Image: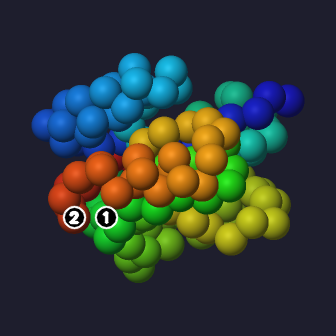
Amino acid sequence: MSTFDIFLVPAESQYRKYSKIIDSLSKKYDTPSFPHVTILSMLETEEKDLITKVKKIAKSFKKMEVEIFGINFTNTVSQCVFAQIKMSPQLLSLYQELATNLQYSNKSPFFPHMSLVYGDFSPDEKSNIASRVKVGNKLGSCEA
């Protein structure tokens, strides 16, 4: 068994836009850069089984509109500074379909977000970063 994460990736034009934002932050704070919306994380399964099931589920969802409703931060490294993603029925349905079919047993509630900065920074620094980030409210189409 291996451990996997499942993401939505912005459509190409939006990917370029958010890559620029995240790249500039990643250079300044020496953090990873990869625009995505996390759907499942730390999923333990067999790769072959995962690929088969995810491809089948993804066909039902293709593209979905994703909306950002704020920039925030937490005390976790992976959600240091992030864009909060508005929960939609389609997004929740995708999560539930994947979680059920992949027997995902994470105890944390589903919290869709796009990480902008990873790391362990002071609350003041995270607040400062969050207040300076301007991303608009539409992430646009994402692909499963």
* Image vertical order of residue 121 relative to residue 32, above or below: below
Q: In this view, does 80 lie above or below 138?
A: above
Task: Say the numbered circle drawn on residue 137.
Answer: 2
Q: Quadrant of the N terminus?
A: top right
Q: Where is residue 64 in the image (x, y as percent from the top left)?
A: 29, 60
Q: How many C-alpha atoms fall within 10 Å of the one at disc 1: few (<14), some, or many (≥20)?
A: many
- Where is residue 6 drawn, in percent x and y? 56, 43
* Towards the viewer: 54 or 19: 19
Q: What residue type is labelled 2?
A: Asn
Question: Which of the labelled discs sits on residue 82, or is there none?
Answer: none
Q: Identify which residue is drawn at 80% across, 40% down.
A: 44
Q: Residue 52: name its quadrant.
A: top right
Horizontal relation, residue 49 to residue 36: left or right:
right
Residue 97 x %, y %: 58, 65
Furthest residue to the front?
124
The residue drawn where x is 30% and y is 50% is 132
Q: Given contact means CB atoms under 8 Å apart, are the residues at marks 1 and 2 in contact?
A: yes
Please name the residue shown 60% across and 55% down the image: 123
* Residue 18 visible: yes
Q: Name the residue under label 1.
A: 68
Hey, which residue is sitting farthest left in the picture? 13
Which type of secondary structure does the marked residue at label 1 adopt? Answer: strand
Quadrant assignment, res 75:
bottom right
* Disc 1 residue type (three-letter): Ile
- Kindly report the distance in space between the C-alpha atoms of the residues bearing marks 1 and 2: 5 Å
Q: Measuring from the top left, give residue 118's x and y in whole percent.
A: 56, 37
